């Protein structure tokens, strides 16, 4: 989830990023925030961009200094971090395990284990779990392959409340297992309601787990939702196999929807919001990238497609938006290409080979990229091209979990291991 020049200038995007950071802080009140925290899927602002201290401009030939490394079970759940603790999920036989590790050493602080059988289809590319935990204050929310939501005390691992969405709300388990990551809004935790044609969204009270609302009019969501503020209205944006949709996060009411044109869509990647009126989404298989422009007409939000193109097709990775350009790893089951696209026109300004399918994080004017073969790279990117400053092999194949950057510490995992590196 290549060699040309340039250094990034972020002065033009800093006001937008600052506004988005404040907005996210207000909406997800209680989430662990700050330079040393990564509280949810995609980081503090759910866009894989963080305000990090000065990072090294290059690494030693063997790679950045490794702080610790240890074995972990199977899984693609990414890592969340607070000031002292690292959290993620892994599989051990027919059980899923929520684990808390010492941030400085990787030693286990606590584990919560529960039964979660898997099928041959789930195990075809790895047994999961896929969803990333959500950390809000001293509460950790997790969802496993079989659509069981837990709320745990992040200090002890004790279960505060839980919901089995299959047994309690009639959800279906997706064929390859549940993958969408939950999101916080005011006093609510919101998540996709499992599989089925009318799965939709469901919301619970963060504190006691009482039911808040459910929207059954949306199709299966494997992508993780985001929160936006459009003309003073809070909206939860969800990318599904059939549409891009906006929902009132307080009630679940559908505000708008725009259809996907293809019948074969791997809608896994998280939408990107420009902060004004544009939403970028990308999917693999017989799909591509598109930008939807939101307008206000008659007091309602109306979506219109600004452009569509097939040259950037993000599978289960992520993209980074810097100013008017989106950077991401394009490809599904064939060769992967790192590409840059103008978000306002759809023009592909460059495409470069050199990495397998990859995920990435952006901080301090640099992109940290991890490809599925376990190659870690430090890049600078701009509309003019990219420069590879450093690269090294750090993990085994199928390193599909996106990296986490908290302060100057980078946390990554592959199918069997978790490790921490110093990028300062």
Image (tube, grey):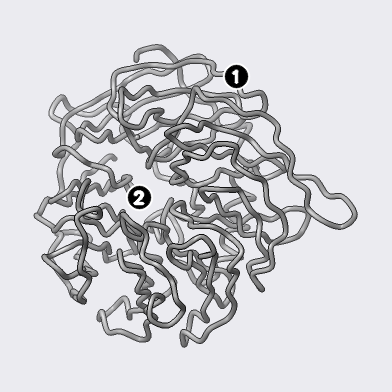
Disc 2 crowd rating (10 Å Cα; few below 14, some 14-19, many 20+) is: many
Q: Which residue is mark 1?
A: 347
Mark number displayed over residue 94? none
Out of 197 and 101, give the one closest to the viewer: 197
Query: x%, y% of residue 149?
Result: 37, 74
- Single out the mark in the foreground, 2 or 1: 1
Apparent side of residue 19 relative to residue 89 in the rendered image (left or right): right
Identity of the residue drawn at 21% across and 63% down: 118
Identity of the residue drawn at 37% across and 28% down: 331
Query: x%, y% of residue 173?
Result: 36, 65
Q: Which residue is mark 2?
A: 407
Disc 1 crowd rating (10 Å Cα; few below 14, some 14-19, many 20+) is: some
Out of 67 and 413, give the one closest to the viewer: 413
Identity of the residue drawn at 34% across and 35% down: 1
Q: Secondary structure at mark 2?
A: loop
Q: Earlier in the sequence, mark 2 or mark 1?
A: 1
Identity of the residue drawn at 36% across and 69% down: 147
Apparent side of residue 236 relative to residue 129 in the rendered image (left or right): right
Query: x%, y% of residue 398?
Result: 20, 40
């Amino acid at each position: 989830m290549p060699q040309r020049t340039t250094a990034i200038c972020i002065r033009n995007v800093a006001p937008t990023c600052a506004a988005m950071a404040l907005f996210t802080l207000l909406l997800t009140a209680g989430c662990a925030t700050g330079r040393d925290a990564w509280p949810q899927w995609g980081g503090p602002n759910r866009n894989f961009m963080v305000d990090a201290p000065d990072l090294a401009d290059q690494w030693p030939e063997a790679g950045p200094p490794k702080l610790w490394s240890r074995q972990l079970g199977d899984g693609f759940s990414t890592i969340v971090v607070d000031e002292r603790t690292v959290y993620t999920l892994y599989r051990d036989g027919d059980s899923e395990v929520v684990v808390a590790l010492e941030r400085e050493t990787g030693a286990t602080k606590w584990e919560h284990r529960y039964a979660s059988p898997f099928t041959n289809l789930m195990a075809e590319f790895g047994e999961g779990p896929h969803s990333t935990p959500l950390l809000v204050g001293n509460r950790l929310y997790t969802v496993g392959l079989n659509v069981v939501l837990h709320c745990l005390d992040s200090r002890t691992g004790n279960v505060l409340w839980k919901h089995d969405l299959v047994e309690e709300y009639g959800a279906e388990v997706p064929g390859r297992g549940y993958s969408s990551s939950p999101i916080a809004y005011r006093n609510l935790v919101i998540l996709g309601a499992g599989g089925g044609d009318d799965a939709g969204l469901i919301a619970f009270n963060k504190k006691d787990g009482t039911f808040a609302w459910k929207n059954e009019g949306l199709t299966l969501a494997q992508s993780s939702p985001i929160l936006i503020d459009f003309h003073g209205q809070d909206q939860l944006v969800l990318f599904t196999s059939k549409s891009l949709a906006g929902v009132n996060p307080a009630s679940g009411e559908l505000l708008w929807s725009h259809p996907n044109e293809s019948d074969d869509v791997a809608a896994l990647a998280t939408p990107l919001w420009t902060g004004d009126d544009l939403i970028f989404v990308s999917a693999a298989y017989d799909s591509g990238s598109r930008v939807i422009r939101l307008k206000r007409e008659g007091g309602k939000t109306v979506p219109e497609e600004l452009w569509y193109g097939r040259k950037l097709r993000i599978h289960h990775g992520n993209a980074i938006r810097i100013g008017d350009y989106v950077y991401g790893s394009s490809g599904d089951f064939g060769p992967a290409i790192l590409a840059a696209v103008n978000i306002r026109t759809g023009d592909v300004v460059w495409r470069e080979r050199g990495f397998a399918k990859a995920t990435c994080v952006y901080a301090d004017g640099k992109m940290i990229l991890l490809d599925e073969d376990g190659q870690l790279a430090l890049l600078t990117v701009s509309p003019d091209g990219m420069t590879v400053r450093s690269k090294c092999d750090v993990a085994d194949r199928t390193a599909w979990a996106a990296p986490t950057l908290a302060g100057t510490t980078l946390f990554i995992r592959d199918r069997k291991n978790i490790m921490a590196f110093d990028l300062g």
